[in-house]
Amino acid sequence: MRRKTGTLRTVFVVALTAALAGACWAGSARHAAAFFRMGGGHFGGARISGHSSGARYGVRMHGGDRISHGRHRAELPSRGSEGRGGRGPRHFPHRLVLGHGNGNGNGGRPGLLAPGGSGGGGLSGGGRIGGVPPAGERRFVPDEVVVEFHPRVSPQTIARFARIFNLTQLESHSFALLGGATFYRWRITPGSSVPGMVSRLQNQVIVANAQPNYLYTVQDDVSQIRPAASGDEAQYALRTLQIKQAQQFATGKDVIVAVIDSEVEASHPDLAGSIKKKFDALGGAGSPQSHGTAMAGAIAAHGKLLGIAPGAAIVAARAFDDSRGEAKGTSFAIYKSLQWAADSRAGVVNMSFVGPFDPDLSRMLASAGSQGIVLIAAGGNGGPDSGPQYPASDANVIAVAATDGKDGLFPLDNRNPYIVLAAPGVDILSLAPDHAYQESTGSSIAAAQVSGIVALMLQVQPSLKPRDVRAILTDTAKPLAASENSSFEPRLVNAYLAVKSAEDVVVSGVAGHEQAKR
């Protein structure tokens, strides 16, 4: 009797299992058919998903990835089945996708399997960085997005991701500053909305981050080409900053300064031997441009004009185009340039450009700062009513405003509280292409001069950390006349006092360092 009961129980379990399996298969057959039409473009609005921690609702990333369309999700073939020439998924679970666009740019809630959510935050702990630009922000390439995938996503899955969303890969690059993370630059379908596409992409589980490819501009106006002579009065910055006194202690000898800018004319006689390496983040041939050449000269010129640190070794990265006037650069070109600067062992990075906040660039700047690289940026020339500009507003960056020959603030200086330092930046005699000279005005050249001062400081004390440099520059700078904005009180740097203070750190050790900070 007991044996008969056991047999009946087994038959019942088998029958119930078969019935459930049949129901599941019937509910998902149409999704299987849709999946096999993927190559024909039927998944233009699809959602790709991958492994979520714990794999409660699906297989692990290395075993297979998921793809969904509308409200349903189908399994992509695992890496193993692809290797064996598998022709499709082995099963198609019928599950709802909770995330739907809500029209406000954030794409609604993430899909059921999306880790973290669509908000901000780092990537640690399974979170993601919110990459949708703020409402009204249009400073980005109109048909490109930048995507970072989670680790272990297979190339095959990325290729399918591209087909589904109609993306064309333009380039990819790995960044040691971010632990080897690889960013992909994609062109989107003409006429598509960049914010809308970013919103869709960043809700995919295999995506660590998606964002626009932002645009940045250089920050100086060139008044006119003009001749130059040694000791020219237009080099009033040398007197203001007490450069001759500072250069009795250091010239920046062998300190590597990276200039991320437009193309530098390395053959200019005032830069003879100063440009040690060059990097082209844009590809193709570039023509020397006035802005990049002026920034390199402000740091290291040693001919008719004298730079702040004539002994510095300049490594020049071309991240901005050679258009006349306002040269433009993109997030991706700046990422590559910053990584190259770190690989080149730069002690200082000069960034005389501004643009919108960029979450990926923020991560890279934090990593560079943690490695001891001093980051200097132009505060911007947007005027008193301008909002925060990036990268100057980053906590890891020293932002610089411009002053004139009477130590007055440049009228177009951005007036934001994160700008704590200033340097001469009005009608500054600088280098120009074709072995010429020009007058430059703006926070760009002011920032370049501070980069030169940091090179002097690092020569006398190579062990200075970015926080030490910031403290010494601030404590040895001169207060300027109070501005109408009480939160904007930049101080005019003094190269001689900063270098002397850095030298005292060498002589006196920790005690001297603490005294310099006070």
Image: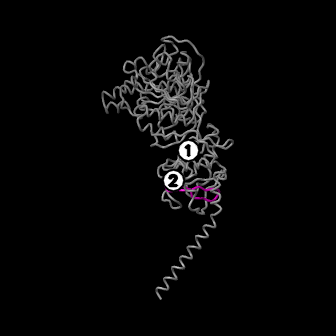
In the image, residue 33 sits, relative to residue 216, either above or below, namely below
**Quadrant placement of the C terminus:** top left
* Residue sticking out furthest to the bottom: 1
Q: Nearer the viewer, residue 423 or 166?
A: 166
Q: Nearer the viewer, residue 190 or 445?
A: 190
Residue 385 quadrant? top right
Spatial CA span between label 2 and label 1: 26 Å
Q: Position of residue 50 (x, y in %)?
A: 54, 54
Task: Give the residue pinned by disc 1.
Answer: 147
Q: Is residue 509 within the magenta segment? A: no
Task: Specify the amino acid type for callout 1.
Answer: Val
Q: Residues within 10 Å of mark 2 (few under 14, many from 20)?
A: few
* Residue sticking out furthest to the right: 191
Task: Say whether residue 389 is visible.
Answer: yes
Q: Nearer the viewer, residue 183 or 1?
A: 1
Q: Nearer the viewer, residue 405 or 505?
A: 505
- For the image, the number of numbered tags is 2
Residue depicted at 56% across the width and 50% down the height:
119
In the image, residue 364 sits, relative to residue 16, either above or below, namely above
* Residue sticking out furthest to the top: 229
Task: Specify the amino acid type for callout 2.
Answer: Gly
Element assignment for label 2: helix
Residue depicted at 49% across the width and 23% down the height:
296
Task: Say whether residue 490 is visible.
Answer: no
- Which mark is on residue 83? 2
Q: Residues within 10 Å of mark 1 (few under 14, many from 20)?
A: many
Q: Position of residue 492 (x, y in %)?
A: 48, 25
Which dot, 2 or 1, sits closer to the camera? 2
Q: Which residues are magenta?
A: 62-83
Element assignment for label 1: strand
Q: Position of residue 13 (x, y in %)?
A: 53, 77
> Of callouts 2 and 1, which one flags the residue occurring earlier in the amino acid sequence?
2
